[in-house]
């Protein structure tokens, strides 16, 4: 076996063992520093380098925001996503919105959360959610599952009701929760 082949095989084993991508791009180096070396500050710098190099911009932006949140830098993560999301594909926007919602919640930015949740509902109403598909594959706690538009709408309505409750806007929360109950009745009837 050639030395290059041994090196490549060793890198693959390393990637499998540590559950990190294999290679030598800025994004991969950032993931290795984040997950193997467990150096979040250095990982953030490398994620920035990946974004600036155009290497897996969507993944680098999301991963960097999550690391920033873990370090108590959620406001900075919000600004990074807002500043660089235009460099990401249309398919990545929904995922970036979900990261933003989590960051808004962490920072107590309920008004921003409500605006974004309403925008997500508007996209659903205009048939633009899920890139026009009736379902999408979603992940939660490492498990994949199919999520329908109605189920996603219900999830968004629940979050919107919660946000209104945080604002002590109980009338709006009640309206949203009642709408969600009606939607769940339709979903259950269809099952």
Image: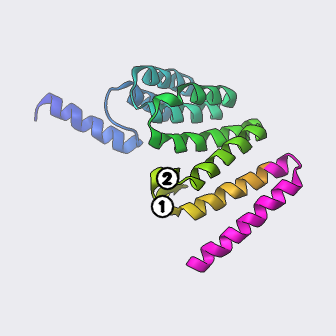
Q: Tell me the quarter of the picture where residue 16 sits.
A: top left
Where in the figure is residue 57, as x and y percent of width and height? 44, 30
Q: Residue at x 45, y 20 (%)?
A: 52
Identify the residue position indicated by label 1 in the image.
135
Q: Residue at x 48, y 63 (%)?
A: 146
Where in the figure is residue 8, as x and y percent of width and height? 22, 34
Q: Is residue 102 left or right of residue 13?
A: right
Q: Which residues are magenta?
A: 164-191
Where in the figure is residue 28, as x and y percent of width and height? 39, 31
Q: Residue furthest left?
A: 1
Question: Which mark is first along the chain, 2 or 1?
Answer: 2
Q: Residues within 10 Å of mark 1 (few under 14, many from 20)?
A: some
What element does badge 1 sit on? Answer: strand
What element does badge 2 sit on? Answer: helix
- Using the image as rendered, state which of residue 22 and residue 147 is in the foreground: 147
As displayed, is residue 150 above or below residue 67?
A: below
Q: Residue at x 59, y 41 (%)?
A: 97
Which quadrant does the N terminus fall into? top left
Q: Residue at x 81, y 60 (%)?
A: 175
Visual colour scheme:
rainbow
| C-beta proximity under 8 Å, tags 1 and 2 | yes
Identify the residue position indicated by label 2 in the image.
130
Visible residue check, residue 72: no
Q: Is residue 80 left or right of residue 29?
A: right
Visible residue check, residue 10: yes
């Amino acid at each position: 076996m050639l030395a290059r082949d041994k090196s490549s095989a060793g890198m693959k084993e390393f990637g499998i063992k540590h559950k990190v991508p294999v290679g030598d791009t800025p994004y991969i180096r950032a993931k290795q520093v984040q997950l193997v070396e467990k150096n979040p500050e250095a990982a953030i710098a490398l994620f920035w380098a990946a974004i600036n190099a155009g290497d897996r911009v969507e993944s680098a932006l999301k991963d960097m925001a999550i690391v920033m949140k873990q370090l108590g830098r959620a406001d900075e993560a919000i600004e990074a996503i807002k500043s660089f999301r235009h460099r990401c594909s249309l398919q990545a926007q929904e995922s970036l919105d979900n990261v933003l919602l989590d960051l808004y919640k962490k920072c107590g930015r309920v008004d921003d959360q409500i605006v974004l949740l309403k925008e997500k509902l508007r996209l659903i109403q205009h048939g633009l959610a899920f890139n026009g598909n009736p379902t999408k594959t979603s992940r939660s706690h490492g498990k994949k599952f199919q999520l329908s538009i109605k189920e996603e709408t219900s999830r968004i309505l629940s979050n919107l009701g919660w946000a209104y409750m945080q604002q002590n806007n109980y009338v709006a929360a009640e309206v949203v929760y009642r709408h969600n109950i009606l939607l769940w009745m339709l979903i259950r009837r269809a099952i």
